[in-house]
Image (cartoon, rainbow, N blue to C red):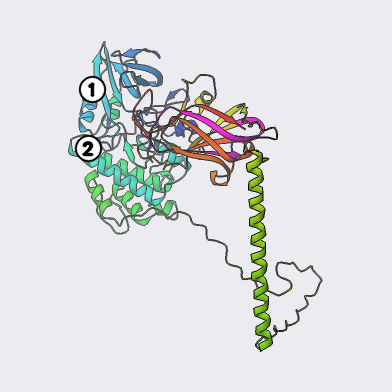
């Protein structure tokens, strides 16, 4: 199930300094970072005719809260370097997060940035992070682009280790096809680095900064197709080996040993897929030394894309399967089945059992069998008659007296019905076994006195069942062990398919799976006010409210349209 997001991400790189864990996890930066008090996204080394033009114009002095075109409110400055600044902003008209690049209108690169942004916006290819607006206004030039908070930079993925062969195959396939389409329209990237490649939550690879990133930094090339092809080869090489294919360290990756030149990926790391390794060597500029089969080098993204298509498709790995324990054959020994033999005690073999005597076949035997059968029939008839007579007598007595000594279910000895009492919620915490919470900071809104406040899930494209996760929910703390028999839950969105279950857990952060928890009650409803009642009260301190299916709902506030749900109020009783 893929999350639908109204936010997005821009282009960015960093240099050879290895990013911190927090920086590596951020795929929402605009591609420019600062480390050790200097710009970490400096110009790439000049290769194949690339030229970097520098500009000394200072970046505009703006602040958080400044609004552009009465629409884009600047919220956080991501970087300020080389005469331009990059911001995370809010589009107040469409209520979504966006990224913004800003520079003075008299900047030497302002015209080229505007031209690159408008050309990139006209491409409209969903494989690229989209340019939404490019404007010159009030002595400022600014470019507005998508912001993708659910995407992860290739830099962060490589920090954890090399990619699996199928992931690397998808990376080079999708990126080479996208860049081939861009070059057919006359657009080049020239800044294809690990921080310019993003993987979304659905597994799609997207490219940010087409044309714009190079224009911001004044990068040009006399051979743009060769430059982009070599960059894709470097990305594939890094994905296979977790090493940068040049002598210098870059993007958090260690470079190759000095003086040995470009060596094949399978000589850097064991177990590298042979076909992908040869493909990386064909794309990189390595003085004609391609692979062992001496196939011609790939000099354009189109040639690289065709070479990828000619390869046998690499399938994803099979899911891990744990074999069941081997069947242990047990032997049955009469007299000792199910018993353990103490150590030091000899097992005595059981004596053979004598066969049963043959059935009665004589006249006497047959007469005896018929006699026993007749006695049994007579006894059953007499017992039935006595039972019927007793029941009739009790019915008569009840009709005469008009009273009954039976107590109705749900009442105590005094005849009064026992009502469940409300239970106090002392705390709550969102339960996200995969480490990706929905809106953890809004959990308290579900049990406060304000019915207008709420905790909401994200909006998903696929549904109504939650497919990307096992479910979504919140664990509530009752302060001490209580007998929970019912719950009242108010929801924000009505509609069919809402499926909700209550579980008893061992803590606010359960360690086991949901399947190992004790179920209290469940329901599937289209209403916004749910009443759940347990067949039998369950004694527990912690209760998990678990959502496994949600209705379709339109866009509102900061949430896009899709399958989603929100909890406004939760009450337990017992």
**What is the CA distance from the residue labelled 2 to the residue labelled 1?**
18 Å
- Residue 505 placement (x, y as % from top left): 60, 39
- Residue 262 in view of the camera: no
What is the quadrant of the C terminus in the image? Answer: top right
Write the start and end of the magenta stretch as one range.
Answer: 477-505
What is the quadrant of the N terminus in the image? Answer: top left
Q: Is residue 417 magenta?
A: no
Specify the quadrant of the image occupied by residue 80.
Answer: top left
Q: At numbered mark 2, what does the secondary structure look like: helix, strand or loop?
A: helix
Specify the quadrant of the image occupied by residue 417.
Answer: top right
Q: At numbered mark 1, what does the secondary structure look like: helix, strand or loop?
A: helix
The crowding category of the residue bearing disc 1, from other C-alpha atoms within 10 Å (few below 14, some 14 to 19, many at least 20), is many
Q: Nearer the viewer, residue 361 or 309?
A: 361
Above or below for 53 versus 377: above
> Which residue appears farthest toward the left when viewing the image?
185
Q: Is residue 490 magenta?
A: yes
- Which numbered circle lies on residue 114? 1
At horizontal 63% and vertical 56% (from top left) the residue drawn is 388
- Residue 484 placement (x, y as % from top left): 61, 35
- Which numbered circle lies on residue 182? 2
- Residue 416 placement (x, y as % from top left): 65, 31
């Amino acid at each position: 199930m893929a999350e639908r997001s109204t936010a997005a991400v821009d282009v960015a790189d960093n240099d050879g300094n290895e990013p911190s864990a927090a920086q590596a996890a951020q795929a929402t930066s605009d591609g420019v970072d600062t480390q050790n008090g200097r710009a970490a996204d400096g110009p790439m080394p000049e290769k194949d005719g690339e030229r970097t033009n520098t500009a000394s114009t200072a970046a505009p002095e703006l602040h958080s809260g400044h609004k552009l075109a009465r629409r884009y409110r600047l919220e956080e400055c991501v970087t300020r370097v080389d005469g331009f600044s990059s911001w995370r902003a809010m589009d107040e008209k469409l209520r979504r997060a966006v990224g913004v690049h800003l520079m003075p209108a008299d900047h030497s690169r302002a015209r080229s940035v505007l031209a690159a942004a408008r050309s990139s916006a006209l491409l409209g290819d969903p494989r690229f992070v989209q340019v939404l607006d490019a404007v010159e206004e009030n002595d400022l030039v600014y470019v507005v682009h998508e912001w993708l908070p659910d995407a992860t930079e290739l830099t962060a993925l490589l920090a954890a280790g090399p990619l699996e062969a199928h992931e690397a195959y998808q990376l080079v396939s999708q990126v080479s096809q996208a860049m081939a389409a861009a070059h057919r329209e006359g657009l080049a990237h020239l800044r294809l680095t690990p921080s310019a490649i993003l993987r979304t939550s659905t597994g799609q690879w997207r490219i940010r900064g087409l044309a714009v990133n190079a224009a911001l930094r004044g990068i040009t090339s006399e051979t743009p197709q060769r430059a982009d092809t070599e960059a894709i080869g470097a990305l594939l090489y890094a994905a296979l080996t977790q090493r940068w294919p040049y002598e210098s360290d870059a993007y958090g990756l260690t470079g190759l040993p000095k003086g040995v030149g470009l060596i094949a990926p399978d000589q850097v790391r064991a177990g590298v897929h042979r076909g992908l390794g040869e493909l990386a060597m064909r794309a990189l500029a390595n003085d004609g030394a391609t692979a062992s089969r001496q196939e011609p080098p790939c000099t354009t993204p189109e040639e690289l894309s065709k070479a990828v298509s000619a390869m046998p498709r690499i399938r994803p790995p099979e899911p891990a399967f744990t074999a069941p324990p081997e069947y242990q054959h047990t032997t049955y020994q009469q007299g000792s089945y199910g018993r353990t033999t103490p150590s030091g005690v000899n097992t005595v073999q059981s004596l053979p059992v004598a066969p049963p005597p043959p059935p009665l076949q004589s006249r006497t035997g047959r007469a005896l069998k018929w006699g026993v059968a007749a006695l049994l029939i007579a006894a059953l008839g007499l017992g039935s008659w006595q039972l019927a007579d007793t029941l009739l007598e009790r019915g008569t007595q009840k009709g005469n007296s008009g009273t009954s000594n039976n107590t109705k279910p749900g009442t105590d000895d005094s005849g009064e019905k026992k009502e469940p009492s409300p239970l106090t919620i002392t705390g709550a915490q969102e339960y996200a076994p995969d480490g990706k919470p929905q809106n953890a900071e809004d959990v308290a809104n579900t049990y406060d006195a304000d019915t207008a406040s709420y905790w909401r899930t994200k909006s998903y494209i696929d549904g109504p069942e939650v497919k990307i996760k096992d479910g979504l929910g919140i664990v509530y703390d009752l302060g001490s062990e209580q007998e929970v028999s019912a719950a009242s839950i108010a929801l924000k969105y009505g509609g069919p398919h809402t499926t909700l279950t209550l579980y008893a857990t061992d803590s606010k952060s359960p360690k086991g799976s949901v399947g190992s928890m004790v179920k209290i009650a469940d329901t599937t409803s289209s209403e916004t006010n749910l009443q759940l009642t347990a067949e039998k009260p369950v004694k527990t301190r912690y209760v998990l409210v678990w959502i496994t299916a949600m209705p379709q709902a339109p866009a509102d506030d900061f949430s896009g349209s899709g399958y989603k749900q929100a909890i406004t109020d939760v009450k337990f009783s017992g």
